[in-house]
């Protein structure tokens, strides 16, 4: 099987089938990335916007990062732009996604798949933490992004990534402790449950 960079090289050389294969390869990850934050009809629109922006940007892509990183940089930008536009229809000021959560913004995720009670609680708690934190945790635990790759997608420094991960976990634990104190969530329980939730949504 060809690697992403090989398919990208072929695509840039005019091989449209290679481009289609690249998008197919990352389709489910993108769909889930958007699906945990917006409605299904909005997911389709964001998918199309991301793919179109990717096609338009490929000629400028120097290959310093992986194609997946490049794709998620665009996906995050499209998501944030979409949220800003949607909320600005009803509010005077653009929302601060470092403070506001999906729940705060009145958005309704279309893809919250969970089997066990802990996963259900984690899915609900993820919607209550700031969008910046939610995106960071999803990319870290579900897409296995680390270090420079995660920093590139989030648009922050690697040092800031570590700080944000710490704060995101703490925020999630605080929500879970408030809403489900009887389950006694700890750091290890949290990580295991977030990872399990990621596997569940991947099977959706």
Image (cartoon, rainbow, N blue to C red):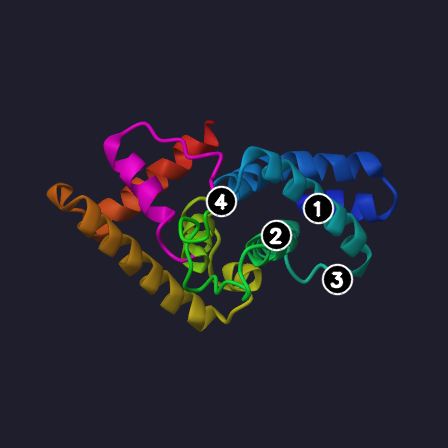
Magenta stretch: give its range: 108-130
Label 1 crowd (10 A; few <14 / some 14-19 / many >=20) = some
User: Depth-wise, is mark 3 or mark 4 nearer the camera?
Assistant: 4
Residue identifier under label 3: 62
Query: Residue visible at 57% across and 37% down?
Result: 31
- Between disc 3 and disc 1, whose residue precedes? 1
How far is mark 3 from mark 4, CA to CA? 30 Å
* Quarter of image, res 130: bottom left
Residue identifier under label 4: 37
Describe the element under mark 2 as helix, strand or loop. helix
Residue identifier under label 2: 82
How far is mark 2 from mark 4, CA to CA? 11 Å
Indicate yes or no whether the magenta region holds residue 28.
Answer: no
How far is mark 1 from mark 2, CA to CA? 10 Å
- Between disc 2 and disc 4, whose residue precedes? 4
Q: Residue 180: where, in percent of width, then height?
A: 18, 43
- Between disc 1 and disc 2, whose residue precedes? 1
Query: Residue visible at 20% across and 46% down?
Result: 179
Q: Residue 97: where, in percent of width, then height?
A: 47, 61
Label 4 crowd (10 A; few <14 / some 14-19 / many >=20) = many
Describe residue 14's horizontal placement relative to residue 199 as left or right.
right
How far is mark 3 from mark 1, CA to CA? 21 Å
- Foreground residue among 99 and 94: 94
């Amino acid at each position: 099987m060809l690697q992403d960079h090989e398919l990208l090289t072929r695509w840039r050389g005019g091989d449209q089938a290679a481009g289609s294969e690249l998008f197919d390869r990352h389709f489910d990850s993108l769909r889930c990335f958007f699906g945990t934050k917006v409605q299904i009809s909005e997911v389709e629109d964001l998918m199309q916007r991301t793919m179109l922006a990717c096609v338009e940007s490929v000629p400028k892509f120097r290959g310093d990062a992986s194609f997946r990183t490049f794709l998620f940089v665009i996906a995050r930008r499209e998501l944030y732009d979409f949220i800003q536009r949607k909320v600005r229809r009803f509010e005077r000021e653009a929302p601060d996604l470092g403070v506001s959560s999906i729940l705060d913004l009145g958005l309704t995720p279309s893809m919250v798949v969970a089997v066990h009670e802990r996963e259900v609680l984690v899915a609900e708690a993820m919607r209550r933490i700031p969008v910046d934190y939610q995106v960071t945790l999803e990319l870290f635990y579900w897409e296995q992004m680390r270090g420079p790759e995660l920093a590139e997608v989030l648009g922050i420094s690697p040092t800031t990534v570590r700080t944000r991960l710490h704060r995101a976990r703490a925020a999630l634990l605080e929500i879970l402790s408030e809403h489900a104190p009887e389950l006694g969530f700890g750091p290890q329980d949290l990580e295991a449950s977030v990872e399990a939730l990621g596997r569940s949504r991947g099977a959706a």
